[in-house]
Image (cartoon, rainbow, N blue to C red):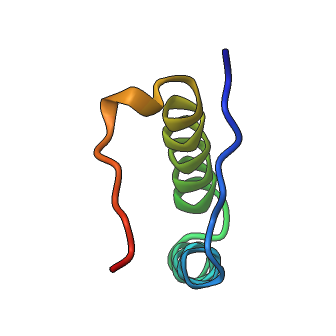
Amino acid sequence: MKYRLLVSDEAYWDMAEAINYYKSLSPGTLVNLFKEQLKEGMDYITRYPQHFAIKYKK
């Protein structure tokens, strides 16, 4: 079963900033590799959420 991943606004903007940074270093290769790794990581989290600790706000 695959779960839905909720990404906070802050995390979204951090990812966008990182993508822009890698794009500025190398318009093709680095940014594509980063996006691929990011997608794989997020897919892994949605498939195996039990592998990660649950954090609660206080």
Residue 17, quarter of picture = bottom right
- As drawn, the residue found furthest toward the front would be 58
Q: Residue at x 47, y 24 (%)?
A: 48
Q: Quadrant of the N terminus?
A: top right
Image location of residue 22, percent across then percent down: 52, 73
Q: Residue at x 55, y 75 (%)?
A: 11
Judging depth in this view, the residue of 33 and 40 nearest the camera is 40
Judging depth in this view, the residue of 4 and 54 nearest the camera is 54
Q: Residue at x 67, y 23 (%)?
A: 2
Residue 36, quarter of picture = top right
Image location of residue 21, percent across then percent down: 53, 82
Q: Quadrant of the C terminus?
A: bottom left
Image location of residue 46, percent across then percent down: 59, 34
Q: Vertically, is 11 above or below 55?
A: below
Image location of residue 31, percent across then percent down: 59, 62
- As drawn, the residue found furthest toward the top would be 1
Q: Residue at x 65, y 48 (%)?
A: 5
30 left or right of 58 in image: right
58 left or right of 38 in image: left
Judging depth in this view, the residue of 15 and 26 nearest the camera is 15
38 left or right of 52 in image: right
| Total number of numbered discs in the rendering | 0
Q: Vertically, is 48 above or below 6?
A: above
